[in-house]
Image: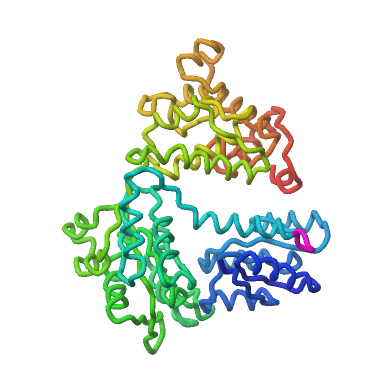
Amino acid sequence: MRLLIVGHLQGHISTAGRLASQRGAKVSHIESVDGALNALRNGQGADLVMCDVEMEIGRLIESLRSERINVPVVACGIGTDAGAAVRAIRAGAKEYIPLPPDAELIAAVLQAVAEEDATFIAQDPVMTPLLQMAERIAASDASVFITGESGTGKEVMARFVHRKSRRASACFVSLNCAAIPENLLESELFGHEKGAFTGAVARRIGKFEEANGGTLLLDEISEMDLRLQAKLLRAIQEREIDRVGGSSPVKIDIRLIATSNRNLEDEVRAKRFREDLYYRLNVVNVPMPALRDRPADIMPLATYFAKKYATANGLPDRPLSDGALGRLQAHSWRGNVRELENTMHRAVLMARSSPIEPEAIMIAGQGLVPDAPASSAALAAQAVIGKPMAAATASNPTLVGRTVADVERDLIIDTLHHCLGNRTHAATILGISIRTLRNKLKQYNESGIVVPPAVGENEQAAT
């Protein structure tokens, strides 16, 4: 893992760096925000940025966002200045670490970042041949094409291949082709020179150069337009790229992995994907099965996510009851592992006791019968009391005749009470954005409805 530390911090910075190094991180230190931005633009790369809370964290995070450099930022500072910590979190920092640094806290932050990328849980027999094949081909430099539905863990498999390869000590760089506007994707891939186009405020190294010596993952490559596919094909064949606005080619040495949730043979036939590029990418195909086709993985995955989110929210471990596990195993999981993860996050927050009982398993948009249609009011009523719709109506007949808005209001207020006023947790449970939640609460306040007070200075100010 690559850690970039930004700031001075009166010598504590070296202590934090040493602790991180002892935990296996590759640490670099830059004293200014501008220096850090230049390093990231020039391809140094980082999996995590730790920044002095007295620096311009807001400017750093905004610059990273506007230049589409995706790296989490945590703030750190000397003493217990709650105001500084709140300002950093409001600016977009993921976490605040007090200094002098605590070894276990540093380790926890690093582990949280590393686990997001490295954890691969696969116990179902259907996964055994896939993992064996992935290990066999990992040692080569052959291109790998990973296919499967959204949420099946294609990027996790890509990282598995990287960790098993001879490039494991080098960097793993990923780019979601579907998340970048078409007119900017070329720059993201190949980089650009200063002034190459409007908004090119500085020279920027692209993902190919950043991944040099390591592995480059192009996620959802089927979303790339045909013009750019031709440039990508040349880069793969010639092992060199041209920066946008550049005057000379740049040699690159990467292992390329691509993913898609579409059938690329169909895309080729429809003339939406180049046939020659398809065959360049598809040297080895790893088809990721849907979660419904690997049922033996539901329990270990659910257990892992329950432990992960209990730890993240400062809660005791919450195992699954037999009834909760039965409900999970009965669901069809159209959203695959990603849907299961979100469901377990909600369950950890909603569970009133340990172990997690069936009523805490709130599957977004569905009742206990996965494919049964339901009205918004009925689903909201079910969520309020954690029971099937028929049982909900029978046991709480006062719901009948009420408006959806009234039921929604009570659901939101009850969820906030359950979360002790924590807006972020409540929004997660409800399946809505924090902005939507705050807008609802503002309406309730203006109508004279009592809203549970927010937890923490930053949330109090936001409502």
Q: Residue 98: x and y, percent?
A: 77, 59
335, 296: nearer the viewer: 296
Q: Quadrant of residue 424?
A: top right
Which residue is painted at 41% across and 44% down in the image? Answer: 123
Is 99 one of the magenta-colored residues? yes
Q: Is residue 418 magenta?
A: no
Q: Check the image and report above or below for 72 versus 339.
A: below
Query: Looking at the rendering, in which quadrant would you find the C terminus?
Result: top right
Provide the major secondary structure of the magenta segment.
loop
Q: 194 or 153, which is in the foreground?
A: 153
Q: In the rendering, at what x and y percent does residue 412 appear?
A: 60, 30
The vertical placement of 168 against 82, above or below, is: below
Q: Is residue 251 above or below residue 395?
A: below
Which residue is at the front of the view, 11 or 396?
A: 11
**Residue ranking furthest to the left:** 269
Image side of residue 209 versus residue 417, left or right = left
Answer whether residue 404 is visible to the viewer in this image: no
190 relative position to 145: left or right: right
**Quarter of the figure that contains the N terminus:** bottom right
Q: Which residues are magenta?
A: 98-102
Question: Image point 52% across, 39% down: which residue?
Answer: 303
Looking at the picture, how far across and down is residue 102, in whole percent? Answer: 75, 59
Pick whichever, 35 or 226, lies toward us: 35
105 relative to 436 in the view: left or right: right
Whether residue 16 appears in this view of the structure is: yes
